[in-house]
Amino acid sequence: MRVVLAISGGADSMALAYAVSRAVGSKKCYALTVDHGFRPESSREAKDVSRLMRHLGITHEIRRLDWDSTGGSKDKIASLPPVQRLEEIARERRYAEIADVCHKHGIGAVLTGHHAGDQAETFLLRLLRQSGVYGMAGMALQTPLTAAAPMEWPNTTTPAVIVRPLLQFKKDALYDICKTQGIRWHEDASNKDARFRRNQLRQVINARSRDPKSPFNVDSLLRMCDIMQGHREYISQEVGRHLAGSAKFDTSSGTVELVATDDGKRGLPLWAANAAVRERVLAEVVSWVNCKGHPPELAHLQQFSRALDSYYRQPSVAGAVSAAGVTVIPPSSRHGWLFCRQAPRPGEIEPHEGLTLGSSVVWDKRLIISASWPGNQSEDSVTWGLYSLDDAMRRWHGQISEHRNQLKRARKRLEPHMVQVTQPVVCIRIADAGGAQTYPVLALGHILENRPASGITIAIRVLGKVGSAASEI
């Protein structure tokens, strides 16, 4: 099996490249360097990494991020995110590039150079953010790669995993590997920029880590991570048991429904009875719905938890609650606790148009949607597209309104309006000698009855999740 090596050029990732290429063979490694373009020397360093990878016999690719989103700004620094969010957004974009490489080359595992020092910093960061047990357990050895995805993916896409094999290695040991093997590395000057919280904590840890009695000693922090990981493992088993029995995941709509009662009994359901388990059930569900690639903040989970408590005290005054890009709709006679994507702002979701049949696209950074028409012999004349309900109603108001009325007359299940506005509208564009016409064929979660095409299959699944729901129209 081939692996992607995430190589920054620092001693940790260079030691990773050396060790992994010697363990599995350089031909099974594909190295990727993402040049963020924050520093003038970053491009030169990335090219130097490429030469070092060639020396190790590893195929290497450089991807440089373009922060000039306006397309016309001469000063790209002006288009950078604010410093408070710079690391977060850079990480999201870096992992999006990694995900793209994995899918283009059919590689299912990404190895990173995160080491013991990074784990210690992560523990302190999450402690300062008042994270729960899961957060303070630190980085896991293996996690799914749920990064924002490229626009088009092949239909054979399967989620990749991130593996961190160096978490038990201290930075000094990685320096020693590079020195003994004659491997050059680069020191990133931005790692000393005190504007970033992680860098501040790194400086504190480095200054006090040689004192075995210091609470900032790396070994002490790693022991705390190990303790928290034991708690996390037990809670994870409980969470998995409750999700299996109490949650309904709908891959076609990207929604999750949690039971509101157990066997009709009044009061909190079992999944919400224990505070630690409830927090993680909510975190799993919110992460599944919003597809952000990182866990929701504890404050947002507490907001949802308070809404649950309020409902069971006084159901008549409960309303929908939104946080972390997710809306929670209180139970009704038709459903339990319903989690859906927060209603998009007008124009927030851009349409996809002119897509070729047989292709897949990531819509709204959370749903992978594909369309195929096996029986059609003139696919060049047919393309398909995706629109938000807001956009589609402006274009085809009459058709979609009549579609809604037909569904109501047929007593077909319609999701609450707060769910409907988060769902895609699929359209087909058919061109012939008389011109071209675009028709909505899937809206409000149902196929339109009055449609010009038949035999087209639409498949929808949530980003990074296995399984899909398909509709033939």
Image (spheres, rainbow, N blue to C red):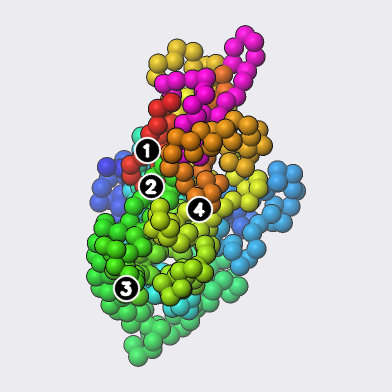
Q: Which residue is drawn at 35% across and 79% down?
A: 221
Q: What element carries label 1?
A: strand
Q: Earlier in the sequence, mark 4 or mark 3?
A: 3
Residue 77 seen in the figure: yes
Q: How far apart are marks 1 and 2 (CA)?
A: 8 Å
Q: Distance between the residues labelled 4 and 1?
A: 18 Å
Question: Could you say which is closer to the camera, residue 241 or residue 234?
Answer: 241
Q: What residue type is labelled 4?
A: Arg
Instruction: Tell whether label 2 touches label 1 (CB within 8 Å).
Output: yes
**Which part of the image, by quadrant, shows the N terminus?**
top left
Q: Is mark 4 on a helix, strand or loop?
A: strand
Write down the residue under mark 4: 341
Q: Which amino acid does label 1 sit on?
A: Ala
Question: Could you say which is closer to the camera, residue 440 or residue 98?
Answer: 440
Instruction: Tell whether label 1 touches label 4 (CB within 8 Å).
Output: no
Q: Which marked residue is nearer to the observer: mark 4 or mark 3?
A: 3
Q: Which mark is residue 273?
A: 3
Q: Which of marks 4 and 1 is nearer the N terminus?
A: 4
Write down the residue under mark 2: 250
Q: Which residue is drawn at 36% across and 50% down?
A: 249
Question: Could you say which is closer to the camera, residue 462 or residue 344?
Answer: 344
